[in-house]
Amino acid sequence: MAITIHIYYQGQKGSARQFAQEMRASGLVDQIRAEEGNLRYEYFLPLEDPETILLIDSWRDQAALDAHHAGPVMAEIVRLREKYDL
């Protein structure tokens, strides 16, 4: 059974959007999409809230999600969250 997670990143002065842009530009999004068991990893912009980014993150199963959370990409995601104060 697939696991889908919706994460709302909220920032100030465009920081959430900058975070998503850096995730893409740095290649992290492509790395995550290439991970075993990743089904979807996409960012969306809510029309009514320019300071929020929605991430839809979907995995084949809990084992795939756990491997993602334990992998080296996760440390970089955490670093960027802190950089953009999300």
Image: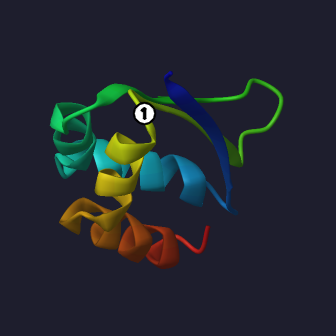
The residue that label 1 is drawn on is 61
Q: Is residue 15 above or below residue 35?
A: below
Residue 86 left/right relative to 71: right
Note whether 75 is above or below 54 in the view shown: below
Which one is in front, 15 or 70? 70
Residue at 17% over, 43% down = 31
- Foreground: 60 or 30? 60
Q: What crowding class fits label 1: few (fewer than 14 Cα within 10 Å), some (14-19), or many (20 or more)?
A: some
Location of residue 19 (image quadrant): bottom left
- In this rendering, position of residue 63 left or right of residue 12: left
- Residue at 49% x, 23% y: name it: 2
Nearest the viewer among 40 and 26 is: 40
Tell me the residue at 33%/42% (across/down): 64
Marks counted in the figure total: 1
| Element class at badge 1 | loop
Image spot of residue 34 (x, y percent): 16, 33
In the rendering, at what x and y percent does residue 60 appear? 38, 27
Disc 1 marks which amino acid?
Asp
Q: Is residue 9 above or below residue 74?
A: above
Residue farthest to the right, as pictured:
48
Foreground of the two, 20 or 5? 5
Based on the displayed image, in which of its 4 quarters is residue 12 positioned? bottom right
Query: For residue 83, which quarter of the picture?
Result: bottom left
Instruction: Give x and y (percent) for residue 6.
Output: 64, 36
**Color style of the picture:** rainbow
Query: Horizontal and vertical percent for residue 35?
Result: 19, 39
Q: Which image quarter is the C terminus in?
A: bottom right
